[in-house]
Amino acid sequence: MRFEIAKRKLLTTDDTIEKIALDIGFSDKSHFIKGFKKYFGVSPGCIHE
């Protein structure tokens, strides 16, 4: 659920990946990126372009 919210934010806002990670409860950006990639198969940077 948190990664779905993060994906929506990545697609609809100009917030940084770090800010989005913090917003959904991750204190560590790298941990968020690893989890996001495992969940979607792509890194959040690919979606945020």
Image: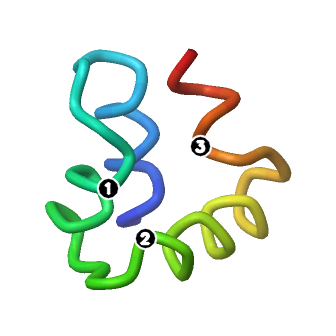
Position of residue 4 measured from the top left corner of the image (x, y, whole percent): 44, 50
Q: Residue at x 21, y 52 (%)?
A: 19
Corner quadrant of residue 33: bottom right
- Residue under circle 1? 18
What is the secondary structure assignment of the residue under circle 1?
helix
Position of residue 37 measured from the top left corner of the image (x, y, whole percent): 74, 60
Q: Are marks 2 and 1 in contact (CB under 8 Å)?
A: yes
- Please state which of the two labelled residues, at mark 1 or mark 3, is closer to the viewer: 1
Q: Give the colouring mode of the picture.
A: rainbow
Position of residue 41 measured from the top left corner of the image (x, y, whole percent): 84, 52
What is the secondary structure assignment of the residue under circle 2?
helix
- Residue under circle 3? 44
Front in this rendered view, residue 33 or 40: 33
Residue projecting furthest to the right: 41
Corner quadrant of residue 36: bottom right
Q: Judge the density around disc 2: few (<14), some (14-19), many (≥20) Cα neighbours within 10 Å.
A: some
Of the residues under marks 2 and 1, which one precedes in the sequence? 1
Residue 46 appears left or right of 3? right
Q: Is residue 10 above or below residue 38?
A: above
Q: Are marks 1 and 3 in contact (CB under 8 Å)?
A: no
Q: Gap between marks 2 and 1, in whole Å?
A: 6 Å
* Three-letter amino acid code at the position of disc 1: Glu
- Residue under circle 2? 29
Of the residues under marks 1 and 3, which one precedes in the sequence? 1
Q: Residue at x 41, y 20 (%)?
A: 11
Of the residues under marks 2 and 3, which one precedes in the sequence? 2
